[in-house]
Amino acid sequence: MRIGVDLGGTKIEALALADDGAELRRLRAPTPQGDYQAVVVAVRDLVAAVQVGLGAAGTPVGVAIPGAVSPATGLIKNANSTCLIGKPFDMDLAAALGSPVRLANDANCFALSEASDGAARGADSVFGVIIGTGTGAGIVLGGRLHEGPNLIAGEWGHVPLPWPEDDERPGPPCYCGRRGCIETFLSGPGLSLSYQTMAGRALTAREIAARAGQGDSMAAACMARYERRLAKSLGMVISILDPAVIVLGGGLSNIARLYDRVPALWGEFAFSDQLSTRLLRAKHGDSSGVRGAAWLWPAGGGVAP
């Protein structure tokens, strides 16, 4: 049995997962705002509630977080939930739970979930992309999560958009302090900004995709630009990592046309005469974060190599 927790900005989700991937119990609770100790208590109580009657006391717990653990200090960095920053969250949570705790970035957990028993099951190399409010990714190689010595492997959203057109330079400002990051073009807000720049009015990403499907020429042109930008960005990834499967998650992954149109374009940008890389929609959707957190621990609670 495995226990996973997805710590989001507004909700916490906990899951008990059988060794074969079957869900045994899933519970949610609101995330306390701005109160670190209250977050620790909320996670502790939710995990305890999930464990009731399952004989899971002391089971190691994996936690997906909106940030990362600094290799230098062991403290949380780059977290959207700012009350976690600078705190030894894994240690404090392990003490509260009385169980070992392993943390990973939420995009990494997404990739691990889809590689373990999701859309990319059986693939030797997986690049799991989240395109939603932000843009991130995780990498799984040989069934193992690859985080790198700096714990930034897969931070695909914060490199420049490759092969930019003249009107894409220097690009929109990014919260990381630079301009023209992939995230500023491919996130939901990035797609909305692109449409607003072209049409002079704002629409959500979902509305743009729907209007494009209905024959709206402005929305169709905007989607075509988005698809080319996504193809360029993934073509770069293919040239560097050469994954067998790229899995899309997040709100924009529900745009069905991406799965045909982007692979038709990315061959122009990847350094190969032919490509066998598959682009797939996530199997577990919004559940991939919590499922991937559970998969951070191997069956039986041993420590993965």
Image: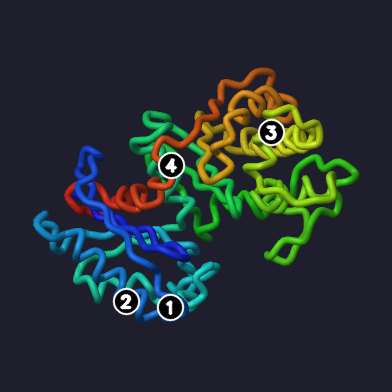
CA distance for labels 2 and 4 = 30 Å
Residue 225 versus residue 12 in the image, above or below: above
Q: Is residue 31 left or right of residue 244?
A: left
Distance between mark 1 and mark 2 Cα atoms = 9 Å
Circle 1 is placed at which residue position? 87
Between label 1 and label 3, give the one nearer the viewer: 3
Secondary element type, mark 1 = loop
Q: Which amino acid lies under the numbered mark 1 shown in the image of this protein?
A: Lys
| C-alpha distance separating marks 1 and 4 | 30 Å
Q: Amino acid at mark 4?
A: Gly
Q: Residue 120 appears at what percent x and percent y?
A: 43, 32
Q: Which mark is residue 231?
A: 3
Q: Are the residues flagged by discs 3 and 4 in contact, CB closer than 8 Å?
A: no
Q: Outermost residue, top direction?
A: 274
Kindly identify which numbered label has been placed on residue 285: 4
Q: CA distance from mark 3 to mark 4?
A: 22 Å
> Pointer 2: residues within 10 angstroms few (<14), some, or many (20+)?
some
Residue 8 versus residue 67: which sits nearer the camera? 8
Number of on-image labels: 4
